[in-house]
Amino acid sequence: MSSRKFDGMATLVTFHAHPDDECIGCGGVMRKAFEDGHRVVLVVATRGEKGEVDEGFLGEGEELWQRRVAETHAAAEILGAKRVEFLGYVDSGMMGEPTNDAPGSFWTASVEEAAQQLAAILREEQADVLTCYDDNGGYGHPDHIQVHRVGMRAAEIAGTPRVYQGTMNRDKMLAGMAEFAKSAAAAGIELPDMDEAEQQEFGKPEAELTAAVDVREFIEHKRAAMRAHASQISEQSFFLAMPDDAFVEAFGTEWFIRAGQGPGITETDLLAGL
């Protein structure tokens, strides 16, 4: 057994596509695992090179990827991760962009090759739990879809016993959007329409989810980790500008799918019993 392991300690490896993804959908689970005495390891496929940044934000000669790596380490410290690794692939950009097919992009990477890299970390850490994303990557981003493919294969190679696919509760999200639209209309704010096809891109129906983790106790850590990613999440952003109660409602539960569990939501702690 690794010297990192102690009685009562399990190891959570959480795998993400870009810097800042970790805090939005999994930050509460990470901090909860840390608070419960477990080891948390963050693995990121790319350095987020295709993110957008305001002119003048970066220092002279500073590349966006350099800032985003530094932000990831700052957020990881807030969330309790003791190790951060980047697989070294290049951000593929949004689906359909020419950058999807650029040399070195994560979207064009060999799933087997990338999975072997991740599996090596899983083995080294003797990981008990891996999180990745659902088969549509939560919302159809190519790098997120690739995280699903690579994560599932890596767990198979390494023999990681528990694999959770992070996702969104589509039913809850659409209901919340409908309520928000009513409030916006009452205030004279017109929101863009989202057609049925677009709605089906986000998350999974609640009936397909098997785990719901209440992370309200760690919501301030989650929001602080978002703030650490200042190049991408500004104080005026959707994430940070919303009132505290709305933020808790939107981000106070993190949703997952574990193959072989269910039907319905049967788990509330990804490391229960470990």
Image (spheres, rainbow, N blue to C red):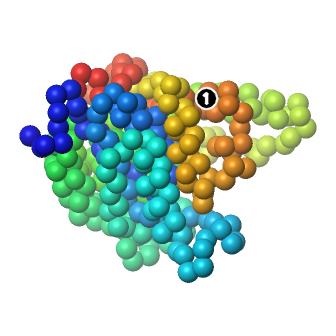
Residue at 73% in and 27% down: 179
Q: How many marks?
A: 1
Horizontal placement of 77 versus 87: left or right?
right
Vertical comparison of 238 with 117: above or below: above
Residue at 16% in and 28% down: 7
Horizontal placement of 157 versus 139: left or right?
left
Query: Going by the picture, which residue comes out furthest to the right?
Result: 188
Crowding near the residue tagged with mark 1, few <14, some 14–19, many ≥20 C-alpha atoms within 10 Å: some
Q: Quarter of the image holding residue 172?
A: top right
Query: Going by the picture, which residue comes out furthest to the left?
Result: 1
Horizontal placement of 243 versus 265: left or right?
right
Q: Quarter of the image holding residue 38?
A: top left
Q: What residue is shown with label 1?
A: 248
Of residues 152 and 62, the one drawn nearer to the viewer in this rendering: 62
Let me know if residue 22 appears in the view. Answer: no
Vertical comparison of 91 with 141: above or below: below
Q: Position of residue 114 (x, y in %)?
A: 27, 61
Let me know if residue 10 appears in the view. Answer: yes
Q: Position of residue 201 (x, y in %)?
A: 54, 44
Q: Position of residue 245 (x, y in %)?
A: 67, 27
* The C terminus - image quarter: top left
* The N terminus - image quarter: top left
Looking at the rendered structure, the secondary structure element under dot 1 is: helix
Q: Amino acid type of disc 1? A: Val
Of residues 49 and 217, the one drawn nearer to the viewer in this rendering: 217
Vertical comparison of 38 with 225: above or below: above
Residue at 54% in and 62% down: 94
Residue at 54% in and 75% down: 62
Vertical comparison of 157 with 251: above or below: below
Of residues 206 and 213, the one drawn nearer to the viewer in this rendering: 213
